[in-house]
Amino acid sequence: MSGVRILENEPGRRLKVFAPGKVNLLLRVGERPPNQPRHELLTVFQGLDLGEYLTVEPRDADETDVVHTVLAPGLTGPKNLDGPGNLALKAIQALRVNGAKVPPTSIKVEKNIPVAGGMAGGSADAAGVLYAANALYQLGFTLAELQSLGAKLGADVPFGLTGGNALGLGFGDKMLSLPGGTKCYWVLAVFPRGLSTPKVFGAFDRLIPDPQPLPATLSPDFVAALDGDVAELAGYLHNDLQAAALDIFPELSQVITAAEQAGALKAVVSGSGPTIAALCPDAPSQENVAARLGAHPLIARVFSAAGPARGDTTDSESASFNQ
Ligand code: ATP
């Protein structure tokens, strides 16, 4: 099963896909092994029906790869977002480096995931492009191969290719599918500016120089709650990076409090922030929380979203979690 879904397909000419954004239901940050730039993580991702729409088309042989991003109203991004550092362009190059014959390619990104918002928008774009180019140009990579080359582009790319609920271990390279019967109603509150992920990890290192070793696996009660009551699941929401994000941007706590006062079961910082993800018990309370946060002076835009979102179900290669 893939997290990316094909929406329109003109074989050989144009492919449009949906790539899901994510929230982390659980984000535990472990030690940084010696000589490793990154901390070990244990995280539970949930794919959302809020995500990116990507259209991939071949260009003439004498042209170059291009990306053009159209931001949804209320979202902002850096001026050079469509420059050579864009992960969508890097995904095309990664396919070539791995031996694929990929023509110059044009990518249009209709962006709904806030830039530097802790919802893995860049990773979703990379996952979507890997999946779309593989299908459009009939490159023949398996989902597992796309995940392994995607992990080198960004820690959240393998999840973008998995979708649903998934357990991520290690440095984003190990991914196991989790059950996902419980429908989650989310409100995502987006701020006018992003937070740099390395800065948030820097604050984490200052605040917690000696993190606890990570548990070897997930508690069975947590796994059961993914198929159980949403209020019970809300009790398991936790983010080790929240204190670090709040240290840099203390006003985030006002939005968390406002969401919970408006009826959210629990609100947390999403990933490395600053987006606040508020889990609601049902659609009416989701509407209520969205209205309250939409009127909050710190917030640029709210989105309502549902999870877990799954994509194409034609592949069945992702490994599953076994207790
Ligand atoms: P994560 O949670 O994976 O750390 P994030 O959601 O906080 O990421 P992104 O929006 O994925 O942040 O990207 C962070 C930075 O990466 C941006 O500041 C931007 O300059 C750069 N970037 C490169 N490609 C992309 C892309 N396709 N979309 C968004 N940002 C991109």
Image (cartoon, grey):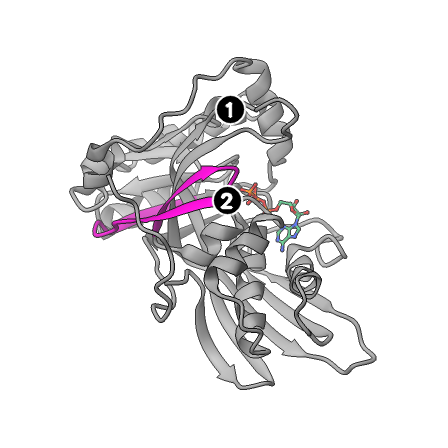
Assign a secondary structure to mark 1.
helix
Give the residue type that dot 2 points to: Asp
Residue 148 placement, left or right of 175: right
| Element class at badge 2 | loop
Ligand 1 neighbours mark 2 (CB distance < 8 Å): no
Q: Quadrant of the C terminus?
A: top left
Tell whether position 129 is magenta: no
* Residue at which label 1 appears: 246
- Identify which residue is drawn at 35% across, 34% down: 267
- Establish if 157 lies above or below 116: below
Residue 173: which numbered mark, if any?
2
How far from the left and from the top, in percent, is residue 106?
68, 73
Residue at x 49% of width, y 70% of height? 17
In this view, which residue lies farthest toward the right? 62
Count of labels in the image: 2
Report x, y in % for residue 168: 42, 41
Q: Determine whether, in the image, residue 136 is placed left or right of residue 8.
A: right
Query: Can residue 250 be seen at all in this image of the molecule?
Result: no
In front here: 310 or 118?
310
**Residue mark closest to the camera, 1 vs 2:** 2
Residue 179 in the magenta stretch? The answer is yes
Q: Residue at x 32, y 52 (%)?
A: 307
Q: Nearer the viewer, residue 254 or 199?
A: 199
Label 1: how many Cα within 10 Å (few below 14, some 14–19, many 20+): some
Q: Which three-letter amino acid code belongs to the residue tagged 1?
A: Leu
Region in magenta: 165-188
Image quarter of residue 296: top left
Residue 6 in sight: yes
**Mark found first going from the N terminus, 1 or 2:** 2
The CA distance from mark 1 to mark 2 is: 28 Å
